[in-house]
Image: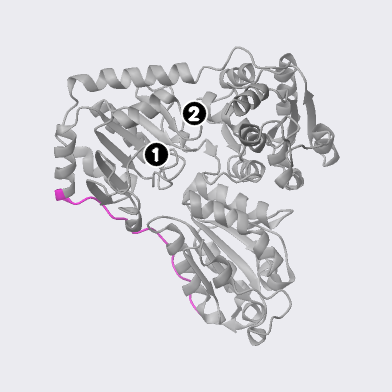
Amino acid sequence: MKTGGQLIVEALEAQGVRRVFGVPGESYLAVLDALHDSPIEMVVARHEGGAAMMAEAQAKLTGRPGVCLVTRGPGATNAASGIHVAQQDETPLVVLVGQIERGMRGRDAFQEVDYGKLFGGMCKWVAEIDSADRVPEMISRAFHTAMAGRPGPVVLALPEDTLTETADVPVAPRAETVDGAPTPAQVASFGALLAKAERPLLVVGGSRWTEESVAELQRFAERLALPVAVTFRRQMLFDHCHPLYAGDIGLGINPKLSALVKDSDLLILLGDRFSEVPSQSYDLLGIPNPGKAVVHIHPGAEEIGRVYRPTLGMVATPAAFLEAMAGLSVTAKPGWAARAEAAHAAYDAWSTPPDAIPGDVQMGRIMAWLDERLEHDAIFTNGAGNYATWIHRFHRFRRFGTQAAPVCGSMGYGLPAAIAAKLQHRTRDVLCFAGDGCFQMTGIEFGTAVQEGAAVIVLVVDNGMYGTIRMHQEREYPGRVSGTRLQNPDFAAFARAYGGHGETVETTEQFAPAFERARASGLPAIIHVKLDPEALTPSRTLSEIRAAGKGK
């Protein structure tokens, strides 16, 4: 006989879980006790939002569900930010939430929450394990559900008395996904559409990718000389230095790439939903009629035709689609290679850092130095803010598994994601980019990095404001600054206070030696980069944005 807590941990072990992230709570003490005797590592976060983001980032980098453990009530509501990331980013996540005893339900007991109502709109499945003998079944279903079709989060509530109840039940086997694949008729239809096309464009994104499928994607694109674009924050899916790479369809899109999408007569959407950000607020394509031939391949059947009526839809993972296309007899037309070459040249020009921005710190030169200095397997993480443009536009991703960033645009994501990445890949460089506002959303997780020996390097790009909101504010209400100023601490001293390494950079020349010292320290490190507030974006100053707003 085993307790419900022991059965939970046994079930996680059977699913191949080696690390969980959480904040302890009295509602799931029996699970914590069972973890004491388990090989599963418990990473203790400082806040449940950070724990959920760590678990989500690990899932992004491994393809298997991340696991987060939180207590009831406030613990669960704190975790909602990371759950939302998993939902929007199509990431498999299993959140285990402590719950009140079963006999107290419905009385508004201490920290009681109806998790079905709370999370029902953003989770694939929300349930409560009402008896210990159902633990293997429920954990197995949670992992299957999180990974199936369009991946996403699952929440399981664990009543306190269920966790101390005993049962004798066998463990369920490891969950594996059941994938769809294109039919022969769909392959033939795709070939016919491709044969008719004069200006095809391949757009890739989503979450159901592996290193092998990314390599197969490159071979597929090369065989047909297709220009390849990636969706927002999915840059690691295609080598940016490859001659077929056309850029990323995200915030602040290259106007020439936007024109390429509009000009295409066959748009192949592989793996992603083409939602608000890549579609440029749903402006690049018509709804529901896209106005051109569209082939939409997605692992979730519910996404095919949800917004755009495709000419051809296929319920398939990227890997299954690419495998089915291996025997395709269509070959590249004479003009396709030249079009792809022009698209890559446009990307090259767009991704060259600017010569100068206001102030003594030139982020363009810093980005160029990092790209020259770091290995191609270095992992970049970030949250949300204008500072992230320096990564998305100017860093050239070369390999799969090197990016963890929130498609949903959640602030505070970068540091928790970097910690998860470093724990997963101890020997690789892991860099977190964070704005001063973004960092302070989850900056306390730097203590987690120190405790776990996760030697991440955090670049805090400090301009003393919530920069993205200030940009919008100056454009819409120029000169009327409200709610966007920040008075910040000494972030380098903050790092040292936690037992990490801290550096302050006030000129471009100070950056390289500061980075090398941080790297050599072997400690989690913060490099406090003081950026001129005028350098609001890589291409426009604060004054220019304000002047443009006044000119409306």
Question: Which residue is outermost to the top?
Answer: 355
For the point 18% across and 19% down, which residue is it?
334
Is 104 in front, or is 317? 104
Q: What is the crowding at mark 2: few (fewer than 14 residues within 10 Å), some, or many (at least 20)?
A: many
Work out how far the residue at label 1 is from the one at label 2, CA to CA, in angstroms.
27 Å
Residue 397: give its label.
2
Residue 100 in picture, x, y percent from top left: 67, 78
Left or right position of 517 against 70:
right
Is disc 1 in contact with disc 2, using a CB cutoff of under 8 Å?
Answer: no
Figure quadrant of the N terminus:
bottom right
Please name whichever residue, 345 or 174, is drawn nearer the observer in this view of the structure.
Answer: 345
SS at mark 1? loop
Q: Which of marks 1 and 2 is nearer the N terminus?
A: 1
As drawn, 100 above or below 513: below
Q: Say which residue appears at 71% left-offset and 53% top-offset.
A: 45
The image's mark for residue 283 is 1
The magenta-colored residue range is: 169-185
Image quadrant in which you'd find residue 194: top left
Tell me the kind of residue under disc 1.
Answer: Asp
Q: Is residue 2 visible?
A: yes
For disc 1, the neighbor class at 10 Å (few under 14, some 14 to 19, many from 20) is few
**Residue 173 horizontal/vertical position (percent):** 44, 66
Q: Relative to residue 528, is residue 155 depicted above or below? A: below
